[in-house]
């Protein structure tokens, strides 16, 4: 069988030929999942996914949970996603919870996402392993699952910072108007990455309340948070941020943060920013990088060349 060839191209060609045979190749490919050679097993799994016959679900599930080769388990998860039969969900859930390889767990989570197995993913939010909770909330974020909102809200108080960070991202993906206040406590989180993700999520929500919360992050003690808040306010383009951004641009913060405040004032595109931007261009109190950004905003947004 050419599938056993050590030559990559010959083996891949054989796999494509088996795919071209369609359903008639399925029994032989299922048998090949027990071959002693790992590359034969993973090519068989790949081909079964391409064919998409549900007869292979049981054998692929067994490979996912029991094969000693990581690549075979990964390709088995991918094949189960391609076939899309709901009977594979329990095996994928078990792989997420127990596989020794992170790549396999991630592939199983991606498979559940691709199969839109929301109920299974929501159930995984209660798993004792923070990695499982993280994978599940990320998959649900990609699905923009409103059904997951109640369970996800609880994860905003999770003991694991990575779970909190990813849950903030989930909230941003949903971008529902009335959830900005759910993110407010994360702006005071002890972990920097959590605060950054909360600011970015609020930026995607874009309501007045979300804008107010991002403005409050301008007072964070960490410059990375303040920079994130400044650029996020520009992306939100909410006129409520005009006065705070002017204060940053003309204030005493780090040069880079003040410069990006000038950029964000241009992004808001409010004529009331013109005079403060002109003042920044001519002020000796503004570093050159701030003056450059102010000039760029005036030129590119307002058509004024100073």
Image (spheres, rainbow, N blue to C red):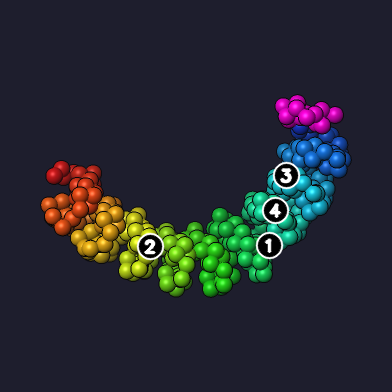
Q: Residue at x 78, y 29 (%)?
A: 6
Classify residue 10 by image quadrant: top right
Residue 112: numbered disc:
none
Quadrant, the C terminus: top left
Query: From mark 4 to mark 1, how far is it between C-alphas?
Result: 20 Å
Whether 292 is drawn above or below 22: the answer is: below
| Viewer-proximal residue among 180 and 41 | 41
- Secondary structure of the residue carrying tag 2 is helix
The crowding category of the residue bearing disc 4, from other C-alpha atoms within 10 Å (few below 14, some 14 to 19, many at least 20), is: some
Q: Regarding mark 4 in the picture, which secondary structure is present there?
A: loop
Is 238 left or right of 174, judged from the image as shown? left
Q: Position of residue 105 (x, y in %)?
A: 68, 55
Judge depth for marks 3 and 1 and give the one in front: 3
Q: Quick check: marks 3 and 2 in contact, CB under 8 Å? A: no
Gap between marks 3 and 2 measured at Cα: 40 Å
Q: Give the mark nearer the N terminus: 3 vs 4.
A: 3
Confirm whether the magenta stretch covers residue 9: yes
Pick whichever of labels 3 and 1 is earlier in the sequence: 3
Q: Is residue 48 magenta?
A: no
Q: Earlier in the sequence, mark 4 or mark 2?
A: 4
Residue carrying label 3? 71
Q: What is the magenta range?
A: 1-14
Instruction: Point out the tag, 2 or 1, that comes first from the N-terminus.
Output: 1
Q: Main secondary structure of the magenta part?
A: helix
Q: Is residue 25 left or right of residue 134?
A: right
Residue 120 shows which numbered tag?
1
Distance, label 3 to label 1, CA atoms, is: 24 Å
Residue 89 in picture, x, y percent from top left: 73, 56
User: Is label 4 or label 1 in front?
Assistant: 4
- Residue 225: mark: 2
């Amino acid at each position: 069988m050419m599938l056993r060839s050590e030559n990559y191209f010959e083996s891949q060609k054989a796999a494509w030929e088996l795919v071209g045979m369609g359903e008639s190749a399925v029994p032989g490919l299922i048998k090949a999942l027990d071959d002693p050679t790992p590359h034969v097993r993973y090519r068989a799994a790949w081909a079964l996914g391409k064919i998409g016959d549900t007869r292979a679900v049981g054998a692929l599930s067994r490979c996912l949970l029991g094969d000693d080769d990581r690549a075979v388990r990964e390709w088995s998860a991918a094949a189960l996603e391609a076939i899309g039969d709901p009977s594979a969900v329990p095996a994928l859930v078990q792989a997420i919870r127990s596989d020794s390889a992170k790549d396999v767990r991630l592939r199983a989570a991606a498979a559940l996402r691709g199969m839109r197995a929301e109920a299974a993913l929501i159930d995984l939010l209660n798993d004792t392993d923070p990695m499982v909770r993280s994978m599940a909330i990320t998959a649900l974020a990609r699905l923009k699952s409103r059904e997951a909102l109640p369970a996800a809200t609880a994860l905003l108080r999770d003991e694991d910072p990575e779970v909190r960070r990813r849950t903030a991202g989930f909230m941003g993906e949903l971008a529902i108007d009335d959830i900005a206040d759910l993110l407010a406590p994360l702006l005071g989180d002890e972990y920097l990455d959590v605060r950054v993700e909360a600011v970015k999520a609020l930026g995607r929500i874009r309501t007045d309340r979300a804008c107010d919360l991002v403005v409050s992050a301008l007072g964070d003690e960490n410059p990375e948070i303040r920079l994130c808040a400044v650029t996020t306010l520009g992306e939100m383009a909410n006129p409520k941020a005009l006065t705070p951004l002017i204060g940053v641009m003309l204030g005493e913060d780090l040069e880079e943060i003040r410069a990006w405040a000038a950029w964000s004032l241009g992004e808001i595109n409010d004529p009331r920013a013109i005079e403060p931007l002109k003042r920044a261009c001519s002020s000796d109190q503004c570093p050159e990088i701030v003056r450059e950004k102010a000039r760029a905003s005036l030129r590119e947004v307002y058509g004024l060349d100073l």
